[in-house]
Amino acid sequence: MLTVAQTAYSSAISDMLGSGYSVLTNGSISTGTGVQIDGDLGAGRSIWLADRTIVNGNVNTDGGISTGNNVAVTGDLNYSSSFWMPGSSSVSGEINIQSWNAPQISDINISAGNTSLYYASNSTVELISGSYSSMTVSSGSTVYLSSGTYNFSSVWLDRNVNIIADTSAGDVIINSARSFSTSSNVKLSSIGTGFISIVSGDSYYLGSNNDIAANLLAKNSGSIDSRTVITGAVYASNSIWLGSDVSITPAVAPVVPEPATVLLLMAAFPYLKKRFVHCHNQ
């Protein structure tokens, strides 16, 4: 049964996905160079799109928007206060001066547990859903998640960590009362037809060269470092920063592997038969 807090997270995720935006904040959005966003972008305050940023959709802001060179917006651009774009940049649709109200997202109040989890480098673990305190996953480790809701006080994923979520029986929701943070080259992927959502009661920070197949939602701010690929929606209440060459694409249901592929995966993952909630070192 869902707790009151978990119900609130589910409502917030539903609000975010129901908004239809790939990137959305009630505050401001800034990008580095070469960012690509597939879908609509919305900000309650200002927007800065750096050189060579591409938005394959509409851009809406209740503030002003400025861009660098060679920026492309393939849909409409709507703003309420100011607009500046050099001649090398373009908007394929209409440019309108009008007010815009950002879609509202349900409040986020996360209740974590008391058990802290620490996994040393190169660990392999399978974690059952439930409420924990902080979770620290050291470099080179692999963590398997099953369908359900995971509540933490904070999450830290070190470099080269691989998170594999089995969503064949339903979605995976990762809630962090404070921060959700990653180092470089972290991968989060799904096996199954469900989706993964990461919800932070404060902020999230994703390091460079991550590959994250999840929706991201923060009560405060969100930062995504350079060359990270996001397959999902990106939301934060107060501000969003996207580093250079970040790519954001809406999530679609993953393809279910063929039986032969599943057998190969099972052969490669001998630890899937065991469930660990404490450290297991290889």
Image (cartoon, helix red, strand yellow):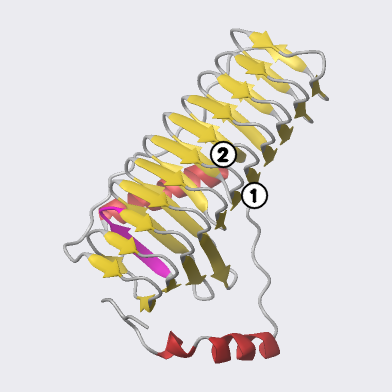
Tag in front: 1 or 2? 1
Mark 1 Cα-neighbour bin, 10 Å: few <14, some 14–19, many ≥20: many
- The region drawn magenta spans 148-154
Residue 130, image x, y percentages:
29, 68
**Residue bearing the label numbered 1:** 250
Residue 123, image x, y percentages:
38, 76
Residue 192, image x, y percentages:
58, 73
Q: Which mark is residue 116?
A: none
State which tag comes first along the sequence, 1 or 2. Answer: 2
Quadrant the C terminus occupies: bottom left
> Magenta residues: mostly which secondary structure?
strand
Would residue 251 appear left or right of 208 to someone viewing this image? right
Give the amino acid type for the residue marked by disc 2 in the picture: Ser
Would residue 151 appear left or right of 16 to someone viewing this image? left
Tell me what residue is drawn at x 41 percent, y 44 percent.
Answer: 204
**Residue bearing the label numbered 2:** 19
Give the amino acid type for the residue marked by disc 1 in the picture: Pro
Tell me what residue is drawn at x 45 percent, y 69 percent.
Answer: 140
Work out whether 102 lies above or below 185: above
Whether residue 107 is visible:
yes
Q: Residue furthest left?
A: 114
Quadrant the N terminus occupies: bottom left
